[in-house]
Amino acid sequence: MPANSSIAQLILLACGAASLVPASLAIKRLSDAPPHETVESGDLGAIVALRDGSTLVARSGTPGREIVDWLASDAPEGRFELGGRQFVGRLADPTIEARVRVPRLIAMLRADSDVDVEIVGHSDRSGDAAADRALSEERATRLAQLLRAGGIARDRIHVEGLGGDEPIADDATAEGRRRNGRVSLILSRRDR
């Protein structure tokens, strides 16, 4: 049994080392690039240089990439739909899929302390507008709690619940209701 464990550890170590080479090359290319530059790095996605000199990696076509690109830009505001399955039914607790994204969002927000985040909660329309609004605000509040637990200052986080007022899909289908039950982000830069 210990021999199998040692072999497995060696294989994992070799795989980890092999993945570092492309990342090292991409970081080297990035160090030669001007600030706010994006360096495409094949399967790794893009390594984007941010205003504070840090870098973040994000795959093209993902909400994370949209946020990273906005952080690297000079745009005063950015609006982002996070996508994926964020909640199950009419619950306020984020799914595991949604929770897995939180540490990356925290890293992105830490990269620029002059960026505030407004978390906008949404729900499908149940026929009770007050209940929809309360649920959507609770969803936004849950994400705000996770961001604060990750070290994002309370004064940078704002919460709003819109209920079913801004659907992105048709509530007549289960898939549409699932997509409408979400949080979206509005990032804005503080006056400098």
Image (tube, helix red, strand yellow):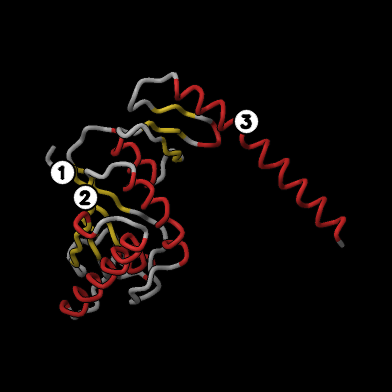
Q: Which mark is residue 21?
A: 3
On screen, 34 above or below 97? above
Q: Could you tell me how far apart the alpha carbons at marks 1 and 3 are, in whole angstroms?
A: 38 Å
Amino acid at dot 1: Arg
Q: Check disc 3 and report its element: helix, strand or loop.
A: helix
Q: Could you tell me residue 78's position as x and y percent?
A: 23, 44
Q: Which mark is residue 120?
A: none
Taking the spot 21% from the left edge, 54% from the top edge, the residue there is: 156
Counting residues from the start of the chain, the first of labels 1 and 3 encountered is 3
Amino acid at dot 2: Asp
Q: Which residue is mark 1?
A: 190
Which quarter of the figure is the N terminus placed in?
A: bottom right
Q: Residues within 10 Å of mark 2 (few under 14, many from 20)?
A: many
Q: Check disc 2 and report its element: helix, strand or loop.
A: strand
Taking the spot 47% from the left edge, 66% from the top edge, the residue there is: 96
On screen, 104 above or below 17? below
Q: Residues within 10 Å of mark 3 (few under 14, many from 20)?
A: few
Taking the spot 41% from the left edge, 35% from the top edge, the residue there is: 55
Q: Could you tell me residue 67's position as x and y percent?
A: 33, 43
Q: Could you tell me how far apart the alpha carbons at marks 3 and 2 are, in whole angstroms?
A: 35 Å
Q: Which residue is mark 2?
A: 116
The residue closer to the viewer here, 24 or 118, is 24
Q: Is residue 17 left or right of residue 48?
A: right
Taking the spot 39% from the left edge, 41% from the top edge, the residue there is: 65
Which quarter of the figure is the C terminus placed in?
A: top left
Q: Could you tell me residue 157's position as x and y percent?
A: 22, 57
Q: Is residue 83 left or right of residue 168?
A: right
On screen, 41 above or below 107? above
The residue closer to the viewer here, 182 or 153, is 153
